[in-house]
Amino acid sequence: MKSKKLWMTGLLAILMMGGTVSAQVRFGIRGEVGINQPSFTRDLYSVENMNDFKVGPTLEFMLPVVDFGIEGSVLYSNEKMNVKTVSEQGIKTIVEDISSHSIDVPVNLKYKIGLISPVKVFLAAGPYANFRLAGDDFEYEAFMDKVEAKKFQAGINLGAGLELINRVAVGFNYRMKLTDDYAVNEPALEDIFNQKDGIWSVTATLFF
């Protein structure tokens, strides 16, 4: 009889724990828009990256009580880039308008700090991987056989923001690239197509 009571108590504890953990798992939709336009000019060419945007589902798992956990997303990403020629007088002329479509997968450790209810501050950091699906090919003769977009990219995200009423999270994200965006077989062009400057973006997530 005693062992039966212990078994029932243990089962009840497991069910209660499972309910608590499940309550910390949330699904949502995340959007992200770039807010800076990094550019680089070298010799006769200039590359200017236009604002990109990302959107897709996200999953958040937070440990009970401590407000520490993991957030992962699968985002459709669209990035655009203008390539321009630069004359001796400094006049820039667009010769390529390149668009790239990819799947972006960030996985971040996340920590929340409670402020005045119902507002929390969150901090996030972790790696991301980017898988190219499709995009425009270079048609300008100077780049056709010298520059090719890579199928895989990776780097690190750092983010911070506010969570409101336990449903809406808005913040800023800083992305650092650890790999090249393009395979370039012309040394003079490598730097302008593989900029390693950090990229800032605004993020917003709606949890269900």
Image (cartoon, rainbow, N blue to C red):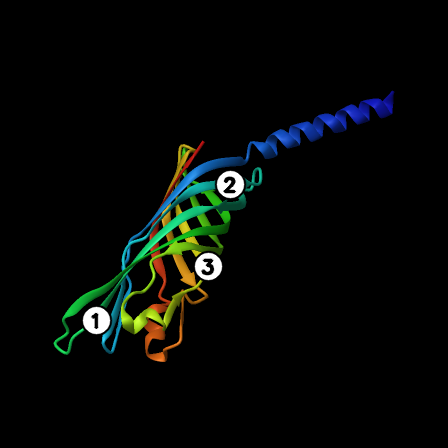
Disc number lying in front (1 or 2): 1
Disc number lying in front (3 or 1): 1
Query: What crowding class fits label 2: few (fewer than 14 Cα within 10 Å), some (14-19), or many (20 or more)?
Result: some
Secondary structure under badge 1?
strand
At label 1, which amino acid type do we have? Thr
Residue 40 at x, y percent in the picture:
28, 70
Q: Quadrant of the N terminus?
A: top right
Query: What crowding class fits label 3: few (fewer than 14 Cα within 10 Å), some (14-19), or many (20 or more)?
Result: some
The residue singled out by tag 3 in the image is 156
For this orientation, the residue located farthest to the left is: 89
Q: Is residue 200 left or right of residue 23?
A: left
Query: What crowding class fits label 1: few (fewer than 14 Cα within 10 Å), some (14-19), or many (20 or more)?
Result: some
Using the numbered discs, state the Cα–Cα distance from disc 1 to disc 2 in whole angstroms. Answer: 45 Å
At label 2, which amino acid type do we have? Glu
Using the numbered discs, state the Cα–Cα distance from disc 3 to disc 1 in whole angstroms. Answer: 32 Å
Q: Residue at x 35, y 51 (%)?
A: 78
Residue 133 at x, y percent in the picture:
43, 53
Specify which label sits upstream in the sequence, 2 or 3: 2
Q: Is residue 188 above or below residue 116?
A: below
For this orientation, the residue located farthest to the top is: 1
The residue singled out by tag 1 in the image is 85
Q: Residue at x 19, y 73 (%)?
A: 86
The residue singled out by tag 2 in the image is 60
Secondary structure under badge 2?
strand
Badge number at residue 174 = none
